[in-house]
Image (cartoon, rainbow, N blue to C red):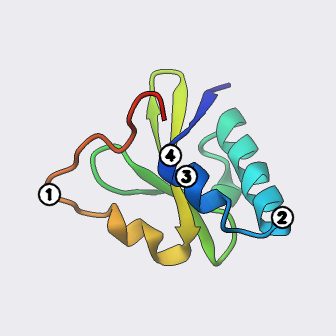
């Protein structure tokens, strides 16, 4: 089981969803916590260790594993993963103390 760390962008964008979608997102975060390879997540690799997992057909979570911690980078509409795919220069996607 992994520990979960919520990044600034994840928290900010999570608040934009209604309570029903927030509940669904948190359900998928629980799947990530227990099994990042859970089939219902439909996880795809992105750039330099980032991954994109599906909440539903419209919402995706961007995340990475560092040791025993899953850093939740961002959450948003399905095409959010394009912001993180194939970037040539990637600064730290997760900053401490967010």
Tell me the quarter of the picture where residue 39 sits.
Answer: bottom right
State which mark lies toward you, 1 or 2: 2
Task: Please give the name of the residue rendered at 85% of the width and 67% of the height, measured from the top-left corner.
Answer: 20
Crowding near pointer 4: few (<14 within 10 Å), some, many (20+)? some
SS label for mark 4? helix
Mark 2 sits on what residue? 19
Q: Earlier in the sequence, mark 3 or mark 1?
A: 3
Query: Could you say where residue 15 lies in the image, as x and y percent from the top left?
Result: 68, 60
Identify the residue shown where x is 53% and y is 27%.
69
Query: Which of labels 4 and 1 is toward the front?
Result: 4
Find residue 86 and report its image quarter. Answer: bottom left
Q: Relative to the observer, which residue lies in front, 70 or 1?
A: 70
Q: Nearer the viewer, mark 3 or mark 1?
A: 3
Q: Position of residue 57 (x, y in %)?
A: 65, 77
**Farthest-out residue, top:** 67
Identity of the residue furthest to the left in this view: 88
- Give me the C-alpha separation between circle 1 and circle 2: 36 Å
- Please tell me whether residue 25 is drawn above or below residue 4 in the rendered image: below
- Left or right: 34 as drawn, with respect to 76: right
Q: Residues within 10 Å of mark 2 (few under 14, many from 20)?
A: few
Mark 3–mark 2 contact, CB under 8 Å? no
Side (left or right) of 23 relative to 48 = right
Query: Residue 88's mark?
Result: 1
Residue at image mark 4:
8
Asked whether the beta carbons under mark 4 and mark 3 sit within 8 Å of each other, the answer is: yes
Q: Earlier in the sequence, mark 1 or mark 2?
A: 2
N-terminal label among 2 and 4: 4
Q: Horizontally, is 36 left or right of 96 in the view? A: right
| Mark 3 vs mark 1, CA separation in Å | 22 Å
Most foreground residue, 18 or 72: 18
């Amino acid at each position: 089981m992994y520990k979960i760390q919520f990044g600034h962008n994840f928290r900010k964008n999570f608040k934009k969803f209604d309570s029903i979608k927030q509940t669904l997102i948190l359900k998928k975060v629980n799947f990530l916590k227990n099994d990042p390879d859970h089939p219902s997540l439909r996880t795809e690799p992105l750039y330099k260790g980032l991954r994109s997992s599906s909440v539903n057909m419209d919402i995706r979570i961007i995340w990475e594993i560092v040791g025993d911690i899953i850093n939740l980078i961002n959450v948003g509409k399905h095409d959010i993963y394009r912001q993180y795919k194939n970037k040539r220069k990637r600064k730290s996607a997760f900053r401490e103390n967010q």
